[in-house]
Amino acid sequence: MRIGVHPNNLHLRLASVWPGAFAGLNPIFVPYGEGRDTASLLESGAIHVGGTGSTPPIEADARGLHVEYVAASAPRPANGAIFVRADSDIGSVADLAGRKILLIDGSFHTYLLARSLEGEDLALGDVERIESGTRDSLTELLEGRVDAWVAMSPRLEKAIERTDLRLIVRCGATIPNRSLFWSLARIGLSPREIAGIASELARVGSEIATDPVRAAHLLAENDRSGIDAEAWERVVRARDFSVVPIDAAVLAEQQEEADTLFLHGHFDCAVAIGGPLEATK
């Protein structure tokens, strides 16, 4: 079983170094750069399953790749936020109209931004989305090259502590912000394999929750960004690492996101979760 691991999925990052994780599936953990690469790696067969936020599998279905959902994390309301500079004239989401927003476009950042804007009768087209890429997002914001920044853990926790930044939106009830673990139908995971992956994700998650200090040290030892174990421990303790099999409620959440992003013009066609792309033009 080739399991994809990218830096922003802490569950799989920890599983890749957690003793005994996925032992019954003869795992090969395959590192890669970011969650938006998951679909292409699954398509090529480089990995058999991966984990991302909610948006990449919808992007994959929009490409006609026929996503096979495996499991889902609990909602993670604390894992995303929108910041502006402390001295900015942006006081609320309503003031984002016409402004430059730095984000990882095509990730859950896009959905968080879309739903936040909806609350002020705005749409994605009313702001300028700037892809963060390899930029230092914090520097881009502080030096005024962008007006707002969509941040996530672990940088989010550090950003909240800063006096030169101001938080204007937290995920909260805006979006569920789950991690989704998924594959493609073409890979042909059996029901037994899918159940085994979901069960092992849940087991490892339970052990992480029981021993957050160990989890934090494992993350720090394998982190090139210089984030220390103390900071990682705060991240781990703040996160619900429980995992559940996919059910109708999670699929309904995914469909709601797909419909929202279509209405905002992010997709040219409506996306049917678990089904083919439906042309509307």
Image: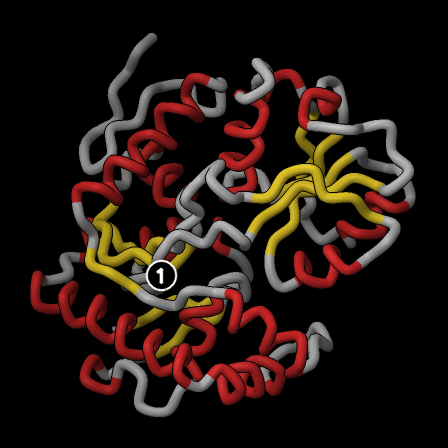
Q: Is residue 253 left or right of residue 198?
A: right
Image-based side of 247 in relation to 137, left or right: left
At x 84% / y 41%, what residue is drawn?
85
Query: Would you place residue 172 above or below residue 89 in this image?
Result: below
Where, quadrant-wise, is the N terminus in this rendering?
bottom left
Q: Is 236 or 191 nearer to us in this picture?
A: 236
Q: Quadrant of residue 113?
A: top right
Disc 1 designates what residue? 50
State the image coordinates of residue 169 (x, y, percent, origin top left): 63, 38
Residue 64 point in image, percent of width and height:
28, 34
Residue farthest toward the left in the current orientation of the protein: 191
Q: Nearer the viewer, residue 37 or 108?
A: 108
Q: Secondary structure at mark 1?
A: strand
The residue shown at (35%, 74%) is 205
The amino acid type, in three-letter code, at marker 1 is Gly
Let me know if residue 30 appears in the view: yes
Residue at figure coordinates x 49%, y 24% from the top left: 266
Bin the neighbour count of mark 1 within 10 Å (Cα to Cα): few under 14, some 14-19, many 20 and up: many
Q: Quadrant of residue 52?
A: bottom left
